[in-house]
Image (tube, rainbow, N blue to C red):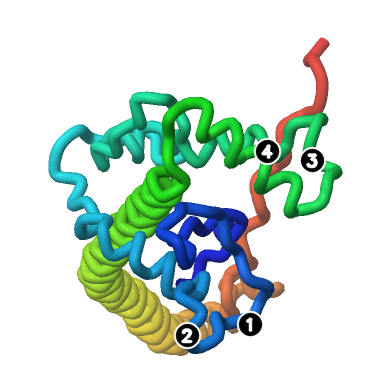
Amino acid sequence: MSKKWYSYFVSVDGPEGQSEPYAPAPGEESSPGSGQKSAAQAIADIASTVQAPPQFTGKAVSNAATFSEVYQAAEIPTPANGFTIFKVADMLQSEHIRSLPVEIKRSSIMLALEASGGKIQDVIQDAIRRDKALDTFEAVQQKSVDQLEARMAEENKKLQAEADRVLNDLRGKIQANNDAVTKERERFLTWRLEKQKEEQRIADAVAPFASPNPVTTGPIPSAAPPAAPPKGPVA
């Protein structure tokens, strides 16, 4: 088992068939012929009694951060005596025992559990059910996220293809506009050269009769930029 938080409590049958708490130290195994199971084997036996992970096909979970909704959707029953693993967790954090040694914490919980008519196996089963519910719901959410990512990736691929197509169209239009300007400017420059030749012909014909020559033979001056509007109110 990878989850160790319930290793506080393992109840196994002793040599005389009495149910008693047993929690060996980490790495400790029961000795051959002792009649006792190891903690790992005892927990594995309890875990084997828990049904398969829930499928979450019933009540929807509206808020995944509210774990109580996850447990309800997983249909985890609450023991009649109310001794869930959370009650044990709250007791362990009680100011009365939280600073005590582990053995005393274990004994205190076992006494309270016995007084309520409960069994530590039921508490561990409750813990395993909730753990499986959380793991299963994590897998459900992971699958949902993966599917969303796949859908968005496919949509982004289509959008990128559309963007590339539109961009190529726009680039083509920009290039066509630039080509049109270049062609028109070349046509204009060619015409202006011919115009200057024509003006020179006219000027040569006028020269014997007028001085200074009133005919211009060069390019016309560039148009002045429009005057900037006055700042502030006009008087």
Q: Which mark is residue 27?
A: 1
Label 2's element? loop
Q: Which residue is mark 2?
A: 33
Q: Which mark is residue 98?
A: 3
Label 3, label 2: how far apart the Cα atoms are: 36 Å
Work out which quarter of the rendered image holds the C terminus and state it: top right
Task: Give whichever of discs 2 and 1 has the lower sequence position.
Answer: 1
Q: Judge the density around disc 2: few (<14), some (14-19), many (≥20) Cα neighbours within 10 Å.
A: few
Q: Position of residue 19 (x, y in %)?
A: 46, 53
- Amino acid on which the number 3 mark rests in the picture: Arg
Given residues 82 and 14, the one toward you in this image is 14
- Amino acid on which the number 1 mark rests in the picture: Gly
Label 4's element? helix
Task: Give whichever of discs 2 and 4 has the lower sequence position.
Answer: 2
Task: Give whichever of discs 3 and 2 has the lower sequence position.
Answer: 2
The answer to whether mark 1 and mark 4 are in CB contact below 8 A is: no
